Image: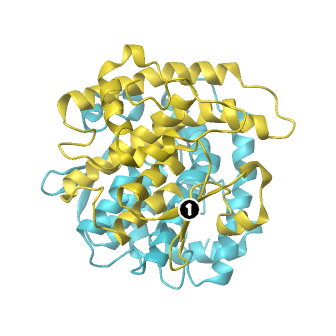
Chain colours: A cyan, B yellow
Amino acid sequence: MRKLYHHWLCPFSRKIRLCLYEKKLDFSLVFEPLWEMRPEFLRLNPENKTPVLIDLNGTTIVSNYGATEYIEETYPELPLFPESPAARAEVRRLLSWFDEKMATEVTLPLVHEKTIKRYMEGSRGPDSAALRNAKQAIHHHLDYMAWLIDRRRWLSGEVFSIVDLTAAAHLSSLDYLGDVPWENHEIVRDWYACLKSRPSFRALLSDRLPGIPPAPHYSQLDF
Amino acid sequence: MRKLYHHWLCPFSRKIRLCLYEKKLDFSLVFEPLWEMRPEFLRLNPENKTPVLIDLNGTTIVSNYGATEYIEETYPELPLFPESPAARAEVRRLLSWFDEKMATEVTLPLVHEKTIKRYMEGSRGPDSAALRNAKQAIHHHLDYMAWLIDRRRWLSGEVFSIVDLTAAAHLSSLDYLGDVPWENHEIVRDWYACLKSRPSFRALLSDRLPGIPPAPHYSQLDF
C-alpha cells in the first residue's frame, strides 16, 4: 500500500490526497507530528515538511512540487494536467500562485498561528498581526479566483485541472478554521460547493483535528 | 527570437538563463524594473515577478516552476532532468530545497536588502537583522551541498542536472554581492569552479548591475 505522510491542515498534503483520490490510487495516511522532529521522518525528508509519499515500489517522493509532478508523470491516466504546452504553462503559473503566494500570504500563517503553534513547546499564543494580515489578504485571492472563474469554466481554463484541486485544498484548510469570508464571495462559493461534492473530497470533509473542531458548515455540501 | 524578462540578481531568472544556454536555445534578455509595476508586465504576470519567458510561437510562460518544467518538456534534447521516476523525484526535492528553502532563508533576503531596496521609493537602508540571519543560514546550505557532493558525483546523483544549475544560480547571485564564505567551504568551492567554467555561465559572469560592482573574484574562473 502507498503511504502518505501528512499533516491535517497542511494544504499541500490535502492537495496530494485529492490527486491520489482523483486518480483512484490507494494509499494510507500517516500523520506526522512535525514539531517532534522525528529522526525517522527527517531521514525521509531533511526539510521536515509534509507531504512525503512512499509509492508501491518504495520510491520516496518528497515535497509538494515533487509529488505533484511525480503523480502525473507516473500515473497519466485520468489526467489532472491539460495536454498543450501553453495550457500546462498556465496550470503551473497558477499552481505557483496558490502554493507559493496564497500559501505564504494566507494559508500557512493562519494554519500555523491557529493550530501548529498549540503543539510547539514554549510557544506563545497566536500573533494577532499575522492573523489580521492573512485575513485581509484572503479577499484579494478570492477576488482573483472569481475573476478567473468568470472568464473560464474552471480556474485554469475550459477543463477541470489540478489547479482546481489545489485552490480547493487551500480553501478547505481555511474553511475548517472558519476563515473563508464566503458571504462576500459568491462566485467562489458556488465553485467550491461544486468541488466539495466530488467523491475525492469526502475524506477531507470527515477530518477532525484533536481539540480543534471544524467550523459548523465545514462538511455541509450546501453550506 | 525568444524573450526572457529577468532581473539581474534574481536567482530564478539566472537559472532559466542557464537552462536556455545549456539547451542551446537563443533568447534575448529584457530587464524588468519590478519596482515600477509596469502595466505591460503586470498583464504578462499579475504577480509582478521574474522570470517570464516568451517562446518563439508567442506562448507566455510565467514563474520559475512553469519555466523550469516547460523548457524540459518542450525541448527535451540535451536533457537537464534524469529519466527514472525516482531520480526525477530526487531532482524536484532538491529544486524545492534550493528554490524555496535556500531562496527564502538566504538568496532573496540578501538580494532584496542589498539591491532591490535601493530602487524602491521611500525605502530605508538594509535591515541588519535580515542580513545577519541570511549570512548565518548560508553555512547550513553550503554544508548540505558539501554533504551531497561528498556522496554523489553531482548534487542530485551521478549525472549533471538542473539541480547543479539551480544551486549555482543562487550562489552566483550571492557571490556577486561577496556573500559566499568560500574559505570555509572548499568542497562546494571546487564544485562551483567547475560550474563557473561551463560556457552557459559566461554571460552571467559578465553581468554588471548599474551602481553595484561585483565582488573582485566574481568572474575569475580560478577564484
SS of the residue at dot 1?
strand
Q: Nearer the viewer, residue B77 or A208?
A: B77
Which quadrant is home to the C terminus of chain A?
bottom right
Give above or below for A13 relative to B152.
below
Q: Nearer the viewer, residue B162 or B93?
A: B162
Give above or below for A77 relative to A70.
below
Q: Residue at 61% across / 83% down in the picture?
A: A152
Q: What's the amino acid at mark 1?
A: Ser
Residue A204 lies left or right of residue B2; in this view the side is left
Can you see residue A6?
Answer: no
User: In the image, residue A28 lies at what x, y percent?
Assistant: 25, 55
User: In the image, residue B143 lies at what x, y percent?
Assistant: 35, 23
Q: Residue at 64% across / 28% down in the picture?
A: A125
Residue B42 lies left or right of residue A19; in this view the side is right
**Crowdedness near tag 1: few (<14), some (14–19) or many (≥20) residues, C-alpha within 10 Å:** few
Report the residue marked by disc 1: B28
